[in-house]
Amino acid sequence: MKQEKHYHVKTCRGWVYAEEAIHGPNNRPTPTYAVYEPTEEGWQDLNQQFLQVNADLRRAGLEVVEAPEPVCDEGSCSRVAALFAAQDIDILHALIITWSFDHYTVRIQQIVGVPVAIHTIPGIHTGSIVGGQQLGCILADLEVEHRLFYGELGNLETSQEISIYAQACGLQRRLKGARFLMLGRRTPGMTPIAVDEVEIMRLFGARLVQMGMDEFADLAAKVSAAEAEAEWKNVSAQAASRSS
């Protein structure tokens, strides 16, 4: 589905900025896969656990793309990575069934290039928690965005936390290439509010567009009061629907 981009202008104490409202799906599909090591205890339950975690994620509002096979060796790793690389995604979801080699998920992430949600589950003998923590340490050393989650399968709270993280990653991705409008100059004597354009680009991938008051006044003069009122009602309705 093609996304339409609209720009709304807001004012506050002489500052004006443009926010990019993207109409279309709020979330891209979330690819999910299970990782295990055949020599570790607990891998025999992976099919049931994989079905359960995907059901949990769907209950939390995510559209799920399931890997057709678990990742446990170089071949399965390459096939799953190729599948996900062909998807338009914001995040990877790795269910750590047992302790497993960390380089599988590292390899998939290198190919796909999105943040990783590491999902660990209880089990004192399976090593899921240890495997997840080990993977998290490696991703941290590589400076790859990731989050470690822990919880019983079937626990909606855990899947909701993953859903929130997926939405945040999607929002950050959609901000890349966006443009923010800055009207005029900052208020004298208010040094802390000075805008660091490089930092904004580093964090969000967005850039600032400068506009003088004369340019803004010319644009505003071309918009009728009826058009402005209709647009304001549209923006207000969207804000109300998203906060409810």
Image (cartoon, rainbow, N blue to C red):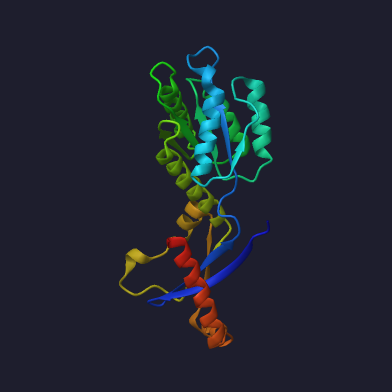
Front residue of 121/178: it is 121
Q: In which quarter of the image is the N terminus?
A: bottom right
Quadrant of residue 113 within the rendered picture: top right
Q: Position of residue 66 (x, y in %)?
A: 61, 35
* Residue at image point 43% right, 34% down: 148
The correct choice, above or below, for 34 with respect to 145 in the image is: above
Figure disc tally: 0
Question: Going 51% across and 30% down the picture, which residue do you hit?
Answer: 95
Locate residue 204, reporting x and y percent: 50, 54
Q: Is residue 136 above or below residue 238?
A: above
Query: Looking at the image, is 231 positioned above or below residue 79?
Result: below
Q: Along the line of sight, which residue is nearer the eye, 224 or 47?
A: 47
**Residue visible at 40% across and 77% down?**
14
Can residue 106 be seen by looking at this rendering?
no
Q: Estimate the x, y position of residue 120 in percent, counting from the top left.
A: 44, 29
Q: Quadrant of the C terminus?
A: bottom left
Residue 186: x and y in percent read 39, 72
Which residue is the extreme one toward the top? Answer: 39
Residue 125 in sight from this viewpoint: yes
